[in-house]
Image (tube, helix red, strand yellow):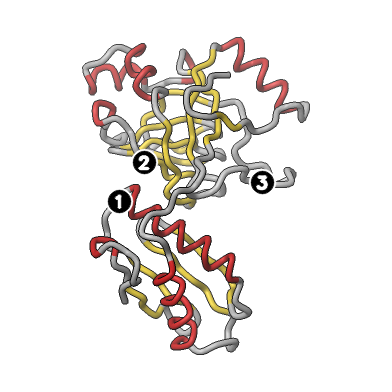
Amino acid sequence: MTGGAMNSDLAAQLLPVGDSALLVGFGRLVDEAVNDRVRALCDAVLAAAPAWLEDVVPAYASLLVCLRPGSVSLARAREEIAALLAALPAQTAAERRVWAIPVCYKGEFAPDMADMERLCGLAAAEIVRLHSGRDYKIYMLGFLPGFAYLGGLDERLHAPRLETPRVKIPAGSVGIGGAQTGVYPLDSPGGWRLIGQTPVSLYDPERAEPIFYQAGDYVRFLPITAGEFAALTADVAAGRWQPQLVKAGDTL
């Protein structure tokens, strides 16, 4: 099924998933324009708020629309979703939300930095400059509560995962695995190469919004010193730290 106002390269398919869900797929390409279409449709479904809607789950290039069991036929829900697709504008210009994530890239917080220097042929300072020098789009959330799949890692920083994954990675660790980068929101096993750590809580079940960012937002990593890391850790523990939004060109 193709949305009438969409470009042909962003045509969508609506496929049943069991008897109470529909998957709207835009192909298999990991691409910002494709993901923008996923986000636009997700927002349109939520805004329409049909009585049969149970949940929506956006991913890189697809949107899973979950139906309340027994509330509507798949055919009827498919028609309504197709109508929302057809009504989407050819391009969606949404305001960009960029969340600042402070990261210490030094010493004990970056146990794999030396390996990254060897693998990438770059000095640590250049790795930090490249890694913190752009805004990363959150394509989707998954794996762990608050784990953001980020797009846009500089090709010069692509590096293979560890041959033997770690049994436990500290919460807040910033890693690189293949062509992706991300932050472990909780203590977890993992095989990504660790180049830094943030002291802020990406997932806090006691917070009004346990996960303060969402798919479609952006993340900017801001280098901090070990002293600033300690100060921010104290602020987080005392409840003084609040998530911060920044704009293009802004610094903290």
Quarter holding the N terminus is: bottom left
Front-lying residue, 35 or 221: 35
Residue at the spot x=56%, y=29% of the render? 246
Q: Nearer the viewer, residue 204 or 45?
A: 45
Three-letter amino acid code at the position of disc 3? Pro
User: Are discs 2 and 1 less than 8 Å apart at CB?
Assistant: yes
Q: Decide which of 95, 184 is in the foreground and name it.
A: 95
Q: Amino acid at mark 2?
A: Gly
The residue beneath circle 2 is 151
User: Position of 156 compared to 105: left or right?
Assistant: left
Q: Earlier in the sequence, mark 1 or mark 3?
A: 1
**Real-space Cα separation, disc 3 to disc 2, in angstroms:** 22 Å
Question: Where does residue 14 sit, x and y in percent of width and height?
Answer: 36, 76
Disc 2 secondary structure class:
strand
Measuring from the top left, give residue 171's x and y in whole percent: 56, 34
Residue depicted at x 58% and y 19%: 252
Mark 3 and mark 2 lie on one chain; the one further toward the N terminus is 2
Q: Which residue is mark 3?
A: 210
Q: CA distance from mark 2 to mark 1?
A: 8 Å
Asked whether the beta carbons under mark 3 and mark 2 sit within 8 Å of each other, the answer is no
Q: Type of residue at label 1?
A: Val
Residue neighbourhood size for the residue with mark 1, other residues' Cα within 10 Å, grouped as few (<14), some (14–19), many (≥20) = some
**Location of residue 8 with respect to 246 vertically, above or below:** below
Callout 3 secondary element: loop
In the rendered image, which residue does mark 1 sit on?
30
Q: Measuring 31% from the left and 73% from the top, which residue is drawn there?
A: 2
